Image: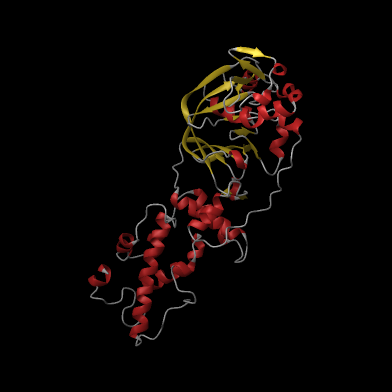
Amino acid sequence: NQIYLRTGYRPLWHDGKDWTQRGRQVFDLLLNADSEGLLVYDYLPIGSNRLPRDAKRLDLIASADIMLTDGLARYLRDMTLGRDPNKPRSDGMALLDQAVRQPDIASWTASLAPNNAQYQGLKTALGGLRPLDSKRGLIAVNMEKWRTQQLQVPMRDVFVNLPTFHLEARTQGQIELDMPVVVGKTERRTPLLQGDRITNLKFSPDWGVPSTIEAEDIIPILRAKPELFEKMGLEAIANGQIINVATVDWSKVDPNKNIFYFRQPPGPDNALGGVRFSLTNPQDIFLHDSPDKKKFGAKNRALSSGCVRVGDAAALAHWLLKDQPGWTQDRVKEFMNLGQTRVQGLPAPMPLTMGYYTAWVGKGGKVKYGMDVYGHDAELAKVIDFGTPPKHPFVPALISEADEDVARGLSP
């Protein structure tokens, strides 16, 4: 190629007597690719654990030199652009051209890795695991995500990590609040969101039931056990009027084409609790409080219909409003219990991300492990040819709920 053409087809990494320091650096980089969550055999042939020593064997020297050059090009590509072939990426030759001009290839290459606390924290955790530890693959897949999703952390932001079922409120990347959340069940997944914003807080909110919950939950219950409707705390409305559900033959109502609208008024049993945090996404996903606090203690918290229930809504509301005059913790709680809806805007929309990291570095550098609740890790491992999907820590299956509990627990 062009690089060897410039050298007159002389080796890049061997000076005729021995391997150069830069050549040894390249070999060490490739031999230790697993420290970056990569696979060594992607860059070196299996069994290549040393360079040929006999300088007179020009055929072996040439072959090994090309091996280093080719492996380095692929390594640089994967380190900077990720291994997903479905995403735009080059063959690494432009990066290789830069690399061969560097006096210290090792330092220059290290600078290409994502420079954020999550990637570096995962790398540290990876280095502390034994070679056969099942968590190595889990951490490696999450490091791959950071190579292709290098998010810029705003001055203040809220981050929801779906697989670990938790939320962080951060200032300059430092965690100021950390709480459990409930996310969408497998059949009603919470979407991944980047660049979303919290725009306002709706205190003592009412809840207009979405059409999906109407069709898949409420009308089937009305057909099978209409006596449970009262436990839902809902109003059924048709043509602007509240109706008695007992006067309707629900077996004749098409769940997907009906004239009925269901609403839950503000109150202590409202599915949204004391406050809703409004977002800008087109899927109508938002954060909200919940009267069902016991769900936040479950290990598997994929329980909602897509929206995210937050474990300490009062603390999050105060964190969002604390810089506005008069918004004390007591005032937040007062507004959450008004029983009358009030909307409070923010001086500026608060950046919010819903991410998917099954290995996440929390406070003190401790790694939290989550379940592959939506199967995204298994899909990624297959796409990047990472071998067997990484194993996740055991999380018990959801316990089936009785109809009465389902009726009480309806929520976005």
Considering only vertical position in the picture, is 392 above or below 216?
Answer: below
In the rendered image, residue 241, in percent from the top left (x then y), is placed at 62, 11
Considering only vertical position in the picture, is 259 above or below 412?
Answer: above
Q: What residue is drawn where x is 31% and y is 66%?
A: 100
For the N terminus, give its image quadrant.
Answer: bottom left
The answer to whether residue 224 of the structure is visible from this angle is yes
Side of 290 relative to 192 (left or right): right
Considering only vertical position in the picture, is 221 above or below 325?
Answer: below
User: Where on the picture, by quarter, is residue 233?
Assistant: top right
For the C terminus, give its image quadrant.
Answer: top right
In the rendered image, residue 37, in percent from the top left (x then y), is placed at 51, 60
In the rendered image, residue 86, in percent from the top left (x then y), is placed at 42, 53
Name the one closer to the observer, 81 or 330: 81
Q: What residue is drawn where x is 46% and y is 41%?
A: 153
Side of 41 relative to 63 (left or right): right
The answer to whether residue 266 of the structure is visible from this angle is no
